Structure formats: C-alpha cells, structure tokens
Image: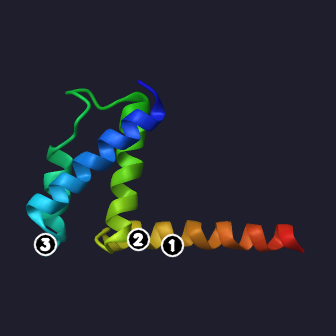
Amino acid sequence: MDVSGWRAIAAKTIADVIDRVGITDGKTLRNAIRAAYPFGPYRMYTPDKIWRFTVKKELSRLNLLPPKQQARLDYHRELKRRRELQKEM
C-alpha cells in the first residue's frame, strides 16, 4: 500500500472516532483515537508515522492537543514562517 492509501485510512478512522465520541472531552477522544489504530498490532515504520502525523494534525485542528504538544507545534510553525520570510528577502 502506498502512503496516500495509509493517509486515507488514518483520516477516515479518526473522523469515525470523532463522530462517535465527540469533541467535548479531549482526553477521552485521544484515548479512543489511540485505541482505534487501524494498521494491526505492531506500531512501526511508515504506517505508524503517517498515523501519528494525521492524529496530531486533526487534534491540532480541533484545538485538542495537550498544551506542551501544542506549544511545540506552534514553535515549529513559527520557525517555518520565519524561514519562508528570509527566503523572500
């Protein structure tokens, strides 16, 4: 299976969990998403990386990341923005 197939499976699984659990309690939602891992019992290699990236992206979009992770993500977004501004100069 290629990367786009894994990404589609991950996104669909996460969307199903969000529809089922709701977004009122972030901790419950994160636990439900963790339990819904769709790529078998072993968490390794490319499918797991894509799963973790997709989970982080969706939780960030819903503002449900833990504060420490959200701060780290915001920091890296700011670094990326600054690099792009420097390239334009």
- The amino acid beneath tag 3 is Asp
First of labels 1, 3 by sequence position: 3
Q: Count the numbered circles shown.
A: 3
Q: Quadrant of the C terminus?
A: bottom right
The answer to which quarter of the image holds residue 9 is: top left
Numbered badge on residue 70: 2
The answer to which quarter of the image holds residue 1 is: top left
Q: CA distance from mark 3 to mark 2?
A: 17 Å
The answer to which quarter of the image holds residue 69 is: bottom left
Establish if 83 lies above or below 52.
Answer: below
Establish if 43 lies above or below 11.
Answer: above
Q: Residues within 10 Å of mark 1 (few under 14, many from 20)?
A: few
- The amino acid beneath tag 2 is Gln
Between tags 3 and 2, which lies in front?
A: 3
Q: CA distance from mark 2 to mark 1?
A: 6 Å
Coordinates of residue 58 in the picture (x, y in percent): 34, 61
Q: CA distance from mark 1 to mark 3?
A: 22 Å
Establish if 39 lies above or below 8.
Answer: above
In what element is the residue under mark 2? helix
In what element is the residue under mark 1? helix
Q: Measuring 36% from the left and 47% from the top, which residue is drawn there?
A: 52
Residue under pointer 3: 25
Coordinates of residue 40 in the picture (x, y in percent): 22, 27
Numbered badge on residue 74: 1
Q: Nearer the viewer, residue 7 or 79?
A: 7
- The amino acid beneath tag 1 is Asp
Establish if 45 lies above or below 33.
Answer: above
Coordinates of residue 45 in the picture (x, y in percent): 41, 29
Discs 2, 1 touching: Cβ within 8 Å: yes
